[in-house]
Amino acid sequence: MRVERQDEREWRARQEAHHARVDAWIEPHLERRRRSQAHPVEDFLFSYYGYRPSRLRRWHPGAYTILEGASGFGTGYVAVPGGETLDTGELIARRLDSITWIADLLRRTASRAGQFGCFGMHEWAMVYRTDDIRHSAQPLRLPAEQVAAAVEERPLKCTHFDAFRFFTEPARPLNTVTLTRELQPATEQPGCLHANMDLYKWAAKLSPLVPGELVADCFALAWDIRAVDMRASPYDLRHLGYEPIPIETPEGRTVYAAKQREFAGRAAPLRAELLAWCDRLVS
């Protein structure tokens, strides 16, 4: 496997740029946490994915890179002539099953055509005919009966298990497919907002074997997707600056489908890059 050497000035510049980039996301989140405040959009990626802000901030060059002049760079790094490098062999051996599973999911997802007809109804299905509202601190835009009517107007077409598992019990039979964790590689498709948001999850799970910039790129995509996800939800977040995308209307559904296509276009090269890293790691 070809090993790249990075000049100390170069890798330190990359590290500093990474810190500056992710601090714009991390610092407001940490400040809200100190005040015991929560933001339903901007805190989601930290709470749902469970990847600590400190880990997102930690920059890594990725596997097969020697950091010239490095000393004590961090856990998992070993000294080599002229600097340090990640102990790639040990880490890959320990994570081989996970890397292989992620690669299979990414490859199979990329092989399918995107579907753009779900219109983000998953958040609506999560509050369908229940008093147990998931984001109970936020008001709904519509009365419960209108929310239910929107869900019942057309079949639910969710293809993402980690959205489906939060559906209310009455909503699950309304989905065109009963989703399970085991079926995830067979049902994931590249038009799904959550499948594209999850690229951040897979990048985080592959870290530190992939570059910190790739993890941050996936986070940036997930950040933008989460905003649209909640704008299209039945919650009213205008008080937080999020104008609704009213998917209960034809106009709103057109806007949502266009956003899906935009995100699918942004996700495709990131998915391909993650898959290329997986293949490189197990080759």
Image (cartoon, rainbow, N blue to C red):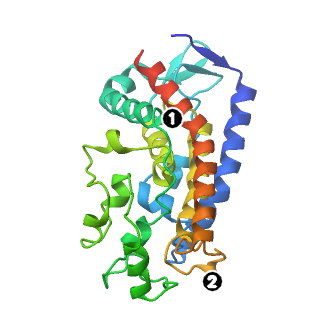
Q: Nearer the viewer, residue 260 or 198?
A: 260
Residue 182 visible to an observer of this rendering: yes
Where does the image place residue 274, in percent across and percent down from the top left?
A: 51, 32
Q: Residue at x 54, y 69 (%)?
A: 232
* Circle on res. 201: none
Mark 1 lies on residue:
74
Q: Residue at x 71, y 42 (%)?
A: 16
51 up-or-down from 36: above or below? above
Q: Is residue 29 left or right of residue 198?
A: right
276 up-or-down from 149: above or below? above
110 up-or-down from 160: above or below? above
Q: Secondary structure at mark 2?
A: helix
Badge 1 crowding class, 10 Å Cα cut-off, few under 14, some 14 to 19, many 20 or more, is few
Q: Is residue 110 left or right of residue 253?
A: left
Q: Residue at x 61, y 75 (%)?
A: 244
Mark 2 lies on residue:
239
Q: Residue at x 44, y 66 (%)?
A: 121
For the residue marked with disc 1, what is the amino acid? Gly
Badge 2 crowding class, 10 Å Cα cut-off, few under 14, some 14 to 19, many 20 or more, is few
Q: Nearer the viewer, residue 103 or 259?
A: 259
Q: Is residue 172 left or right of residue 127?
A: left
Where does the image place residue 67, in percent across and percent down from the top left?
A: 62, 23
